[in-house]
Amino acid sequence: MTERPPHGSARPGGRTARTRAAVLAAAYEELDRDSIAALTLDRLARRSGVHVSTIRRRWRTVEGVVVDLLAERSSVLPTPDTGDFRRDLTQLTEAIADFNNTLRNRNVIQGLLAAAAHDARVEEIVRSAFMRRTEEVTWIVRLAIERGEIPGDTDAWEVIASLAAPLYYRVLILRGVIDERLVHTTVEATYQAARSGVFVRKG
Amino acid sequence: MTERPPHGSARPGGRTARTRAAVLAAAYEELDRDSIAALTLDRLARRSGVHVSTIRRRWRTVEGVVVDLLAERSSVLPTPDTGDFRRDLTQLTEAIADFNNTLRNRNVIQGLLAAAAHDARVEEIVRSAFMRRTEEVTWIVRLAIERGEIPGDTDAWEVIASLAAPLYYRVLILRGVIDERLVHTTVEATYQAARSGVFVRKG
């Protein structure tokens, strides 16, 4: 459904993994110098030393490479587990802030969003990347429910989306950085709302 | 600073106003059929009957026209004044939902955001359009402060941004529609957070 080409099935450290590492590293370096609009498969081939036909076969397009890069970079983000819901929310928010306050990560996300406006496949890829990442960190919410910090029928997905929304609104729409104040208000607003049952689903 | 060409200074109903109305109407019709990427000044000229050089002189680019269209369309959005903070927030949220659930309005905003990734001028225009609109509706918050519904040193701008963020996150990033459930959770989360002093600025 996401139309993303499958990752190589070779064992870790094998040739497929090395090729992927080289191409993603090249994309990461290029995006530190320029926006995604300036990126081409030829430039990626030149910088990575991987043949352009190999890159095209595996990722098809520049957007394909950049989506894979985004997946790799954001999988580095840890899911906090401090034993305290508010502290988990704070650590997660700070991690999202650090990630998005880096110019090249912002280039990646802004570039993909721009491409999504013109390409339904990229749109679906971006959408599902955000959905998947949101789903991954919902266990912060599930743990808070288990500990009795928030109501049992809280919709975990909605809580995480409520946390992410003000951060991406700031970065992608207001085009600003995520500062300490926004981290604070975002965590507190989500925490208070979750505690008071705003995200409870009836029935 | 916004680099937007000045609107004609002729009196309302004059030739300048008629030209603007015709070109914006043409843009509005075109965007119902196609994305902003397909729009050209020539197509606008053809549909509006206004000469392309007139359009170019006044708006410079397609993005200039579309930004003006966005300003015109969103100024139609009323700022509620029901005498009740929660009801004001609900009406504002429903208005933003109705606006963004229209395909051509979504085309306008998604298109501008895409253009912003490649063009710093468009980026600044989009940014300031959102900032201005946010500022306009802050008086909902000021009235709530006057009525004693929320703390006196609440940051009105932050409250409105907190309301807008989940809606635009849904439309522009998750690429979904704003449904009743999202209206409900967004209003309640912002309301609870504002009441409990999350957006209070000390000092």
Image (cartoon, coloured by chain):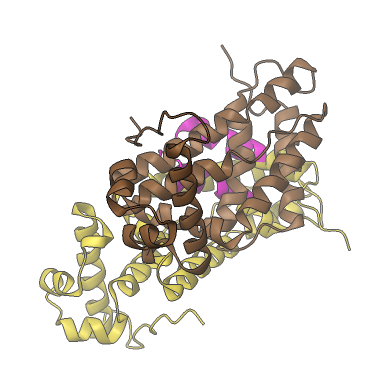
Chain colours: A brown, B yellow
Q: Mark yes or no: residue B173 visible.
A: yes
User: Residue B179 appears at what percent x and percent y?
Assistant: 45, 34
- Which residue is pictured at 20% across the width and 74% down the height? B41
Closer-to-camera residue (B166/A100): A100
A126 vs B124: above or below: above
User: Which quadrant of the structure image shows residue B42?
Assistant: bottom left
Q: Main secondary structure of the magenta part?
A: helix
Residue A43 included in the magenta stretch of the image: no
Q: Mark yes or no: residue B78 visible.
A: no
**Left or right: where A70 falls relative to A182:** left
A89 vs A148: above or below: below
**Left or right: where B100 falls relative to B129:** left
Q: Which residues are magenta?
A: B162-189
User: Residue B52 appears at what percent x and percent y?
Assistant: 16, 81
User: Residue B108 appears at what percent x and percent y?
Assistant: 34, 58
- Which residue is pictured at 26% across the width and 61% down the height? B37
User: Residue B93 appears at what percent x and percent y?
Assistant: 52, 45
Closer-to-camera residue (B11/A64): A64
Residue furthest to the right in view is B203
Residue B164 included in the magenta stretch of the image: yes
**Left or right: where B19 falls relative to A62:** left
Q: How many marks?
A: 0
Residue furthest to the top in view is A203
User: Which quadrant of the structure image shows residue A146?
Assistant: top right
B50 vs B110: above or below: below
A192 vs B48: above or below: above
Question: The N terminus of chain A is located in which quarter?
Answer: top left
- Which residue is pictured at 23% across the width and 81% down the height? B55
Question: The C terminus of chain A is located in which quarter?
Answer: top right
- Which residue is pictured at 28% across the width and 79% down the height? B17
